[in-house]
Image (cartoon, rainbow, N blue to C red):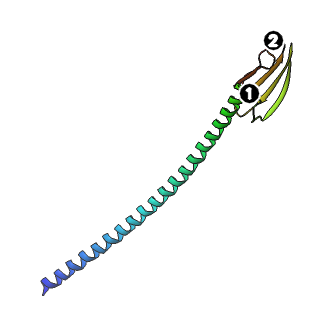
């Protein structure tokens, strides 16, 4: 009978340890599920920002290409942010500031009607 009591205590202890292990496992599973949800949310946010960034880059590139083609065809640029007329020694120069570029249209004695497309930091020829 003492042996049966000892066996019963051992069985109880093993069932208690199994229960504790199961509780710990469920806690770990819950924690990993939370981590996965956070990872999924961060991945979705990152993808949204990636899409927004690349759409903005594509739009900017489209604007540059359209204005570059217009200038090469001797037409006025479509996307001017700021227009100004500069006076030089032998005439005037119309300056158009775009998004990252400048377009100069020369009305001088030696370059009448010529157009020049360049980066925003460029200056007109004299």
Answer yes or no: is residue 88 visible: no
Callout 2 crowding tier (Cα within 10 Å): few <14, some 14–19, many ≥20:
few
Residue placed furthest toward the front: 73
Query: Residue at the spot x=84%, y=12% of the render?
Result: 109
Q: CA distance from mark 2 to mark 1?
A: 21 Å
Which x, y percent locates residue 122?
72, 22
Callout 1 crowding tier (Cα within 10 Å): few <14, some 14–19, many ≥20:
many
Answer yes or no: is residue 36 visible: yes
Query: Residue at the spot x=85%, y=22% of the render?
Result: 86
SS at circle 1:
strand
Give yes or no for contact between labels 2 and 1 (Cβ–Cβ under 8 Å): no
Judging by the rendered image, the residue that carries numbered circle 2 is 110
Judging by the rendered image, the residue that carries numbered circle 1 is 102
In the rendered view, tell whether residue 34 sits above or below residue 57: below
Which x, y percent locates residue 39?
47, 56
40 left or right, relative to 89: left
Query: Residue at the spot x=34%, y=67% of the render?
Result: 25
SS at circle 2:
loop
């Amino acid at each position: 009978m003492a042996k049966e009591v000892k066996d019963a205590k051992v069985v109880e202890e093993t069932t208690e340890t199994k229960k504790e292990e199961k509780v710990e496992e469920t806690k770990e599973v819950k924690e990993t599920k939370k981590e996965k949800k956070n990872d999924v949310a961060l991945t979705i946010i990152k993808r949204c920002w990636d899409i927004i960034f690349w759409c903005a880059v594509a739009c900017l590139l489209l604007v540059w290409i359209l204005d570059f083609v217009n200038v090469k065809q001797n037409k006025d640029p479509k996307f001017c942010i700021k227009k100004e007329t500069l006076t030089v020694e032998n005439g005037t120069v119309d300056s158009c500031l775009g998004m990252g570029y400048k377009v100069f249209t020369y009305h001088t004695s030696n370059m009448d009607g010529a157009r020049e497309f360049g980066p925003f930091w460029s200056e007109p020829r004299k």
